[in-house]
Amino acid sequence: MTTATTDVYAIPQELADLRDMIRQLAQEKIAPRAAEIDRTAQYPQDIRELLAEHDVLGLPFDEQYGGTGTGTLMLQIAVEEIAKACASSALILMVQELGTLPIQLFGSDAQKERFLPRCASGEWSPAFALSEPEAGSDPASLRTFAVRSDDGDEWVINGQKNWITNAGVADFYVVFAKTDRENNRSSAFIVEADREGLDPGKLEHKLGIKGSPTGNPSFTEVRVPAENLLGVEGKGLSVALATLERTRLGAAAQAVGIAQGATDYAAAYARERIAFGKPINAMQGIQFKLADMETRTAAARELLYRACAKADRNEPDLGKYSSMAKLFASDTAMAVTVEAVQVLGGYGYVNEYPVERMMRDAKITQIYEGTNEIQRVVIARSMR
């Protein structure tokens, strides 16, 4: 009996070379800034410019729009490498995909030509405005609404958003709003940041990823032209779900990077730390922790890369695999960073060492891009 086989994923040499370049960039340029970014909670504009200069912000885009055209797997490998050094900096690349993928998937040719090249170059940065104070995991409960102007040439948007990454630094927002309250249907709109009535709101003070601004933008009689409608009127939920099916891989990649960064640091520390006359990595209790950390992280990476390959091949079970990758990788990041703190002991608990930051950064990966409880629902439904 013979069976057909296909590669789960492949990393050709040119992509391996690109990965190595990004890894070097992250370790030499971004890692030395990570503690300061966390301490000051300021958006690292210099890191964004660095990523743009090296075409890293072009990874989410096709070549025709000035991107690299290298696909989902390469994009998430880059997120992973940056997250090893600084999870906040990884979000710069993650949201570059999140805020533009709705345009890539559903935008008109004119919308693509207007927005994508300036994002691929790093000149513009987007935001994805879906969540609200009363609508997080349940996007069908949106209260933000949009109505047509009397002449039909504009849409008028009113509402409040919450937990929006890049609030205050984004050049435009992809905003989801109810357009048919009777039938509970929403639509997506591109809203430029300088539109009158758009207030980026206050920024949250967070446990982790402090260098990535998270805010609560409000929309008061914000007028956008009819051509800023994204996709089909009334199909906003489909735009959101199709986007998140792919972008949750970014959260998984960030989680894998955090976990590997913590594992690498803990292993290096254990080689140098002497207790009872020998390095602590000679002690079985520490060896077992490090072995489990490395194994879980490697397993998460394999699941992530397989899901990325499915995205690049547009395979029908992508949703299930992207949920599994996000769920497993984020749970792994949380477990691994807790153990990394334990390996370092008291040193792990102070901010002179990076693992406490990594532990704080890891927590959000279990929450955003769809909570892990929601991911379990998605996986379970696919098994019916």
Image: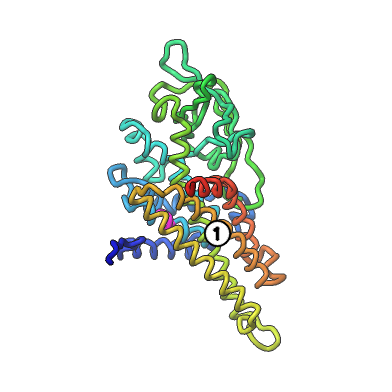
Asked if residue 361 can be seen in this view, the reply is: yes
Residue denoted by label 1: 33
SS label for mark 1: helix
**Which residue, as the protein is rendered here, is positioned at the far top?**
150
Q: Nearer the viewer, residue 72 or 197?
A: 72
Q: Position of residue 316 (x, y in %)?
A: 38, 47
Seen in the picture, residue 363 relative to 128 is either above or below; the reply is below
Residue at (35, 51) in percent of width and height: 312
**Which residue, as the protein is rendered here, is positioned at the far front?**
1
Q: Quadrant of the N terminus?
A: bottom left
Please provide the residue range marked out in magenta.
74-78
Disc 1 residue type?
Arg
Q: Around disc 1, counting alpha carbons within 10 Å, would you say few (fewer than 14), some (14 to 19), or many (20 or more)?
A: some
Q: Position of residue 138 (x, y in %)?
A: 58, 36
Seen in the image, is 337 located left or right of residue 91? right
Asked if residue 125 can be seen in this view, the reply is: no
